[in-house]
């Protein structure tokens, strides 16, 4: 695939939340569908490309420990609480209204943002709690209606889980109804890898 940065239509990803806020459970989940299968190096979203130019240190991390995070009751509680906290704290607003242009990836420090901004904040918070960046991966998906969207994938010993601004529930990646396209590489925060098309049958109906 072309390795040049490309836009993926994420400007439409600020739709209202559909999840119900629930108390975080300290009980770790049973194993999910496992880890999603990735392919080779692929194109970097244009918003992330620009984010990396503005924040080069964010995109130059080379992880050496690539093992998934050990799922515990404590980690599950952190994932649930961070999801609810960030979803409640950030008001959905598109990039045109905030910055006057599309595809701006930034931390929602002013309390507003779209889907990738929620992802960046959750990633920052969880990394601050000790979760390695190799297990906190910005991920680009297609929603069932075809619109581009960004979520945070958390790699764990119980499988890959998704943190989403459209739902307060932490879900296994195969229970989201999304078509997974690409995500950050686990060993290099500035690179992206494709997500294998031959496993899309696990993702549910996306047509």
Image (tube, helix red, strand yellow):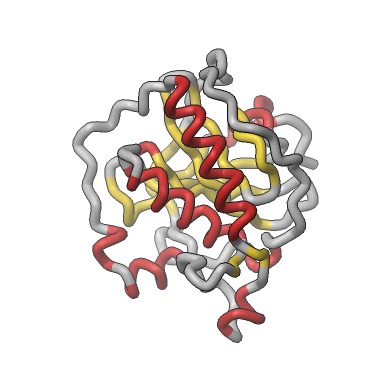
User: Residue 128 appears at what percent x and percent y?
Assistant: 33, 47
Residue that extends furthest to the bottom in the rendered view of this protein: 100
User: Residue 28 appears at what percent x and percent y?
Assistant: 52, 19
Quarter occupied by residue 197: top right
Q: Is residue 34 left or right of residue 42?
A: right
Q: Quadrant of the C terminus?
A: top right
Q: Please name the residue shown 43% across and 59% down the image.
A: 44
User: Residue 57 appears at what percent x and percent y?
Assistant: 24, 63
User: Residue 4 appears at what percent x and percent y?
Assistant: 42, 65
Q: Nearer the viewer, residue 17 or 139?
A: 17
Q: Please name the residue shown 47% across and 35% down the image.
A: 78
Q: Nearer the viewer, residue 5 or 184?
A: 184
Residue that extends furthest to the front in the rendered view of this protein: 23
Res. 47 visible in picture: no
Quarter occupied by residue 11: bottom right
Q: Nearer the viewer, residue 24 or 39?
A: 24
Q: Nearer the viewer, residue 191 or 95?
A: 95
Res. 205 visible in picture: yes
Q: Please name the residue shown 48% across and 62% down the image.
A: 45
């Amino acid at each position: 695939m072309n390795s040049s940065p490309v836009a993926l239509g994420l400007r439409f990803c600020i739709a209202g939340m559909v999840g119900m806020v629930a108390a975080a459970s300290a009980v770790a989940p049973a194993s999910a569908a496992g880890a999603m299968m990735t392919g080779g190096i692929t194109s970097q979203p244009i918003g992330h490309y620009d984010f990396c130019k503005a924040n080069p240190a964010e995109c130059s991390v080379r992880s050496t420990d690539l093992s998934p995070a050990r799922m515990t009751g404590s980690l599950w509680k952190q994932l649930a609480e961070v999801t609810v906290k960030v979803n409640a704290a950030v008001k959905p607003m598109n990039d045109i209204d905030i910055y006057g242009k599309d595809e701006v990836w930034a931390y929602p420090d002013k309390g507003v943002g779209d889907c990738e901004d929620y992802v960046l904040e959750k990633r920052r918070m969880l990394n601050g709690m000790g979760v390695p960046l190799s297990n906190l991966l910005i991920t680009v998906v297609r929603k069932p209606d075809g619109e581009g969207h960004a979520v945070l994938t958390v790699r764990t010993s119980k499988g890959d889980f998704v943190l989403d601004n459209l739902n307060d529930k932490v879900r296994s990646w195969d229970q989201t109804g999304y078509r997974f396209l690409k995500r950050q590489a686990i060993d290099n925060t500035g690179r992206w890898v494709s997500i294998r098309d031959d496993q899309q049958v696990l993702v549910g109906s996306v047509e």
